[in-house]
Image: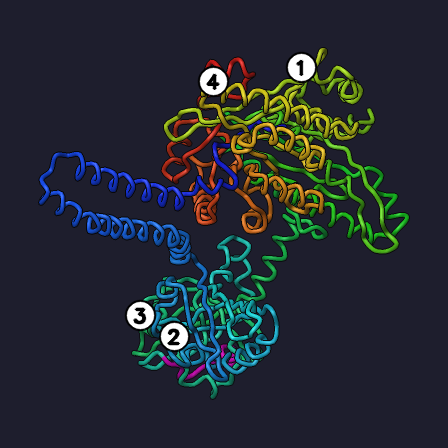
Amino acid sequence: MGKDSMNQNSMKRKQWYQRATIRSVIMYVVLMVVIELGMYAVSKFGGLSEANARQLDAAQPWVVLALSVLFLWFYTRAIVKQYRKPTDLLSEYLANSATIHFELRRVENDFRVHWVSQNAEKLLGYSLDEIKSVNWWYNNLHPADRSSVVKKALRGLDEPEFVYEYRFRHADGHYIWIRDQLRHDDPSGKRIRGSWINISNDFSVPDDSLYTDAMHHVKVGLAELTEHRKLNVVDDIFASIIGLSAEEAQNLRLEDILTPISDNISGGHFPTNEAIEVIGRRPDQSRFKAQLLIRPCPRNEQVIACLADISLVEQQRQALHNAAFFDELSGLPNLRSLHLHFKSLIDELPEDRLAALITVNINQFHHINHRYGSLVGDKTLQRVAKRIKAALPFGSKLYAAGGDEFVVLINNITEYIDIQVITDNILRVFRDKFIIDNNAQFYLTCSSGSSIYPLDGYDSDQLLAQARSAMIRSRTEGTTISAGSQPQSAQPSHFHLQLAEDIKSTTLHQELEVYYQPIFNDAKNIIGAEALLRWNHPEFGLLSPALFLHHAEEAEKLADIGLWVLDEVVLQLNKWIANNSPLNYVSINLSAPQLTSTWIHKLREHYDRDPGLVTHLGIELSESVLNEPDLQVQNAIKALSELGLDIIIDDFGTGFASLTYLAEYPIDQIKIDRRFIANLVSSEKTQRIVESMMTFARAAGVEVVAEGVESEEQFELIRKMGCLKWQGHLIHPAKPVDELNELD
């Protein structure tokens, strides 16, 4: 209940008579009856001659048969098209993916490629028939890898999932690095599914000054090539780099022992007079990275290959980079990274958006080190970092500030309340006990402070100082959160203590009010609304749920508030339906503590009075509710779905397993989080992400709503992507019911 977002007009499980197939059959039967009656009436009462009447009677079954055949033809086409649509969408995705998917089938005592995605032709250069041919995979393995790869593959057949890497010959003749992943999901053992990914680019080396300055430390070997570009004579350094003796290297093609990192290799040969980066594998399976330069000798017709081993240089460069910009313990970027990222963020930040820093410091953390030792302390910090990172929205970044302090960078903020919501999510991760081992189990608390760009400063140093001052102030005053620019930061203890006390008031329901956020279709017509809770506080004015719901939860008032909202929404919904208003659908946000048997019992009471009511209601659940639901929540979701309510995922895309929810739960709608929509116009990457989410949702039969649409450019983009329902401030923000009726 507490978010300025909304959902659309859809039904959970349609009644049998509302299904398209049933409607088509009913229409066919009605049409046949009308035709029969019409022909009978014309025959008996149309004044036809006896001969014409007999002809009409004789033609009657043929007319019915012709119409029946025509109906069956259209009906069959519609059914086939309906069932092929998800397959077509999946095929389109696979054709454009960078990952090749395949399926192996057991043939006698061997496995062969039975099916492979079409993108294999583009990525590997072979036709699908060639890929399915016998021994194609084995014959194109690098000769030096063939023995070890086959052994690993045989071992992988006995494991549920197996990943290994090797060199594989591209159709152009050069070798690429492949990551091969096998998955056993067939109990009979006759099928194996897997994927191939070209990982050659994983070995690319940035061209920076550190790398260039260290080049004089590398080993450089020389080799003479024959006219067919094969190794003829190699020096000792060249031989040591590739791990072969001079005799073993003779007559080998460079393309057979080295793999270019870049894909821009034409004709199956390495270019001349151009330095390229390559990777190779020695017979002992160790990898190396090198620079290769092939040049003709000006004094004769020989061609010389110069190979410089830069493996050690790259390792040193990466180690120095990690030490400079990452925290060794948590693996998070450090404050140096924060300052760099902040500069880039500000350059790209729209003028109507804000950015913020949130500092989080663990209270009395030194007691953990003193009592349990530094090893437990280090594991605890790693666990805290993991929890905070999981609680952050899409686009936010977490940094390690040293010791027991973390910093969160948030961009594209449209409202101050966003900072409060994110901070509350961070604080919630400390509610659960930290279980490090059997002897180290404890609870932690934290203090936090925030600062906002540009209100509290214009660079990361100023903002970090302001956020830390706010954090220290919150710790001194005994609160958990303070802010640099919020008006209530001067006396946060009074504000929060007062809310905690007033939430227990017996007159609370008289001060609560339901606002409604309208939802529109692609023609910008209103088609429904989402119920949003507000508190008209006598001292602090109108408050959003983010400021008081956690107090309601602590006071065990959430369930009562949920029941009150349900009654209010049903009362208003009945008025709209009675007046034939387009506002005949409302969705309600629910948290996990509100999904109780009492709430469902209250809903059943409304259902008993009006069974059709559930087709006008939807329930919005956040991904945090679905992430690790307890048995009560799972049973509640199942009961609501069986009753006929829409089950809606709110803020879709911000969790780790968003797509899996579509398969695990009876989901009817998803609402794409407004942070994606905020970046839609400026980021092509975000556009691809949003379009992919819409494609998968439609393939799963789930409707899509876009949240936070605030500009015509955003509206046009989502409409082109096929999203026909949306909400946002472009037309109308959340308003009381009287003002919403004016929009109707």
Q: In the visual, does 727 lie left or right of 396?
A: left
Q: CA distance from mark 2 to mark 3?
A: 24 Å
Residue 381 part of the magenta-drawn span: no
Q: CA distance from mark 1 to mark 3?
A: 73 Å
Q: Residue 579 got which mark?
A: 4
Quarter of the figure that contains the N terminus: top right
Residue 234 part of the magenta-drawn span: yes
Q: Nearer the viewer, residue 143 or 34?
A: 34
In percent of the image, x 55 and y 77: which residue is there?
153
**How crowded is the residue under tag 3: few (<14 C-alpha within 10 Å), some, or many (20+)?**
few
Q: CA distance from mark 2 to mark 1?
A: 69 Å
Q: Residue 267 got which mark?
A: 3
Mark before the other along the chain sequence, 4 or 3: 3
Q: CA distance from mark 2 to mark 4?
A: 64 Å
Q: Quadrant of residue 3?
A: top right
Q: Is residue 314 in view from this perspective?
A: yes
Mark 3: secondary structure: loop
Looking at the image, do the residues carrying marks 2 and 3 touch, with CB atoms under 8 Å apart?
Answer: no
- Going by the numbered disc 3, the residue's amino acid type is Gly
Residue beneath disc 1: 536
- Going by the numbered disc 2, the residue's amino acid type is Lys
Q: Position of residue 695 (x, y in %)?
A: 43, 47
Mark before the other along the chain sequence, 4 or 1: 1
